[in-house]
Amino acid sequence: MNKNTMYILVAVLIIVIVIAGVVIYMYVGTGGGGGGGGETPATVYTMGNATSLEYTVNLTTASAEPGIYMFAGKGLGTADIWLRVDANPDVSVGTTYSTIMYAGNQTSWTNATGTWEVSDFATDWGTTWSPSWSSYIDHNASWMTGDGDISYSDSSGNDILIYNIVINPTLSDSLFTPS
């Protein structure tokens, strides 16, 4: 083989190696798929865009009355939202009562005595629970799984601790069934 042929072969080999390196970088460096070749990035779910959500709130009022509230919601972002709240507003008494609300047909049930009873949706949803639910989510809309507990004081001087947060859990229909 003459010198010129040798130089041409080496040049071709270098070009092949460079092209292979670029292809490998494009595939591995971008998570596969060639750097924006039409793939849709994975959705990152937060408290603000979850389709279902569970969390617990320890609320200590400005007058130092502690309460525990467990929230669960599904169908979020639709007209068919289900919301359940298990509330123990005075931990010293230890009484828990539950409320289930369905925005789809604007019905509500409460259980304060061990028996589920039809309740007033307008009060339960519009005045009592939906505003609380929404304020916790709005305040923490960017919270993602793994971010840890949330602790803050609201404008009324209440101390709030939100924990046991689960984004997009599979929530059983029985959780939202008064039985």
Image (cartoon, rainbow, N blue to C red):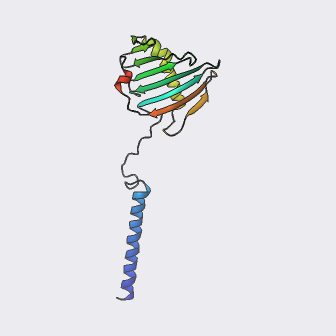
- Residue 121 image-quadrant placement: top left
Q: Is residue 105 above or below residue 145?
A: above
Horizontally, residue 39 falls left or right of residue 142, namely: left
Residue in front for this viewpoint, 174 or 92: 92
Q: Position of residue 134 (x, y in %)?
A: 50, 24
- Residue 92 image-quadrant placement: top right
Q: Residue at x 62, y 21 (%)?
A: 156
Q: Position of residue 56 (x, y in %)?
A: 51, 27
Q: Residue at x 39, y 62 (%)?
A: 23
Residue in front for this viewpoint, 174 or 18: 174
Q: Position of residue 175 (x, y in %)?
A: 38, 23
- Residue 17 image-quadrant placement: bottom left
Horizontally, residue 136 falls left or right of residue 52, namely: right
- Count of labels shown? 0
Q: Is residue 47 visible?
A: no
Residue in front for this viewpoint, 52 or 67: 67
Q: Residue at x 38, y 32 (%)?
A: 170
Q: Is residue 82 visible?
A: yes
Q: Residue furthest bottom?
A: 2
Q: Position of residue 54 (x, y in %)?
A: 45, 29
Specify the quadrant that holds the N terminus: bottom left
Specify the quadrant that holds the C terminus: top left
Residue in front for this viewpoint, 162 or 12: 162
